[in-house]
Image (cartoon, grey):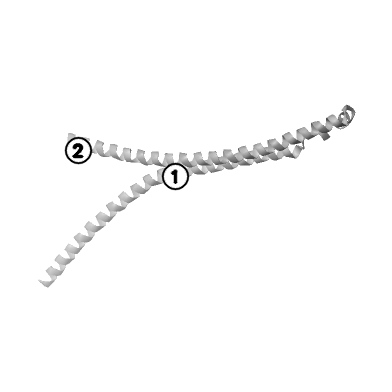
Amino acid sequence: MNLQTLVADVKSRAQQLNARGQKVAKVSLDSLKQANQIVVDRSHTLLDTQAATSRSLLESARAGFTKARNDGVKAVLAAPTSYLPARDKFTTLLTDTRSALTQTRDELVKVAKNGYSAATHEDVATKVKKAASKVTRTAKKSAGKATKAAKAAVAEVKA
């Protein structure tokens, strides 16, 4: 093997790796943009939900404090839980937060899987196209040779 063919081989492999790297970088950037959009949207939704629930809890706490101040110490000692905010507000907040985070995680996993499969499928598709073109070229050569052989056989039979 001479030096020129070795250099050409290394150069072609480097170009292939460069092309693959660019495809992976493009797919990675697209996946990152999608993931960023998901996180931003879900963060805003979560922030709005928690802010609304926090306002509601604050109002309930203020109302309970005002009621306790008006009723007096004996009434508060007799039934202290009646002056606290409702328990369902806390559980609703926690449930909503958990479901929002779970949905965000599921969407991010989906984006990551799609990005990975897109990067690998492009590489596989390129390999399949190259193999198909080789098969097509071989078939065309074989068909050409068969046609020539048939013509030669017909010419031989006529002669």
Q: CA distance from mark 2 to mark 1?
A: 34 Å
**Residue depicted at x 83% and y 35%:** 82
In this rendering, position of residue 106 left or right of residue 77? left
Instruction: Please name whichever residue, 104 or 86, is drawn nearer the observer in this view of the structure.
Output: 86
> Split into 4 quadrants, where in the image is the N terminus?
top left
Where does the image place residue 94, in percent across and percent down from the top left?
Answer: 68, 37
Where does the image place residue 141, in percent across and percent down from the top left?
Answer: 22, 57
Q: Crowding at label 2, few (<14), some or many (≥20) Cα neighbours within 10 Å? A: few
Looking at the image, residue 133 lies above or below residue 63: below
Query: Which numbered marker is on residue 5?
Result: 2
Where does the image place residue 120, in percent across and percent down from the top left?
Answer: 41, 43
Earlier in the chain: of badge 2 and badge 1, it is 2
Instruction: Please name whichever residue, 26 or 124, is drawn nearer the observer in this view of the structure.
Output: 26
Where does the image place residue 123, in percent across and percent down from the top left?
Answer: 37, 44
Query: Which numbered marker is on residue 89?
Result: none
In this rendering, position of residue 28 left or right of residue 44? left
Q: Crowding at label 1, few (<14), some or many (≥20) Cα neighbours within 10 Å? A: few
Looking at the image, residue 138 lies above or below residue 71: below
Q: Is residue 1 in sight in this rendering? A: no
Given contact means CB atoms under 8 Å apart, are the residues at marks 2 and 1 in contact? Answer: no
Query: Which numbered marker is on residue 117?
Result: 1
> Split into 4 quadrants, where in the image is the C terminus?
bottom left
Residue type, mark 1 in image: Ser
Looking at the image, residue 66 lies above or below residue 115: above
Q: To which quarter of the image does residue 26 belong?
A: top left
